[in-house]
Image (tube, rainbow, N blue to C red):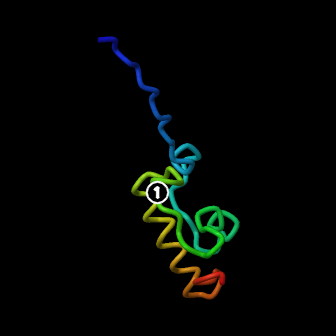
Amino acid sequence: MAYVRRDRKTVKRCKLCRDNVEYIDYKDLRRLREYINEKGKIIPKRINGNCAKHQRMVRNAIERARKMMLLPYTND
């Protein structure tokens, strides 16, 4: 029986870790818009490749921006 080699998935690296980001500001809308989809939902970390620490920071910043009415809750 021949051994079948499976292709390995490429590991997504956290862009924020690579750029040494320590804090994500809720007023930085240009960066936050990268992490929400066209309907206004937060993109999960398994898709965008964030680590858990930075995904929490992104989520908190987006929620703060929504409360301050800088970002919409939904885009219908």
**The one of 20 and 10 positioned closer to us in this rendering:** 10
Residue at the (66%, 71%) spot, across then down: 38
Q: Is residue 11 above or below residue 14?
A: above
Q: Secondary structure at mark 1?
A: helix
Q: Amino acid at mark 1?
A: Lys
Number of marks: 1
Image-based side of 64 in relation to 38, left or right: left
Q: Tell me the quadrant of the picture where the C terminus can be found.
A: bottom right
Dot 1, crowdedness within 10 Å: few (<14), some or many (≥20)? some
| Residue closest to the far front | 1
Q: Tell me the quadrant of the picture where the N terminus can be found.
A: top left
Residue at the (46%, 57%) spot, across then down: 45
Residue at the (67%, 71%) spot, across then down: 29
| Residue closest to the far left | 1
Residue at the (50%, 35%) spot, across then down: 10
**The one of 6 and 63 positioned closer to us in this rendering:** 6
Percent of width and height locating residue 56: 43, 65
**The one of 45 and 25 positioned closer to us in this rendering:** 45
Percent of width and height locating residue 25: 58, 69
| Residue closest to the far right | 30
Q: Which residue is mark 1?
A: 45
Percent of width and height locating residue 71: 64, 80
Q: Is residue 25 above or below residue 72?
A: above
Q: Is residue 28 above or below residue 3?
A: below
Q: Quadrant of residue 28?
A: bottom right
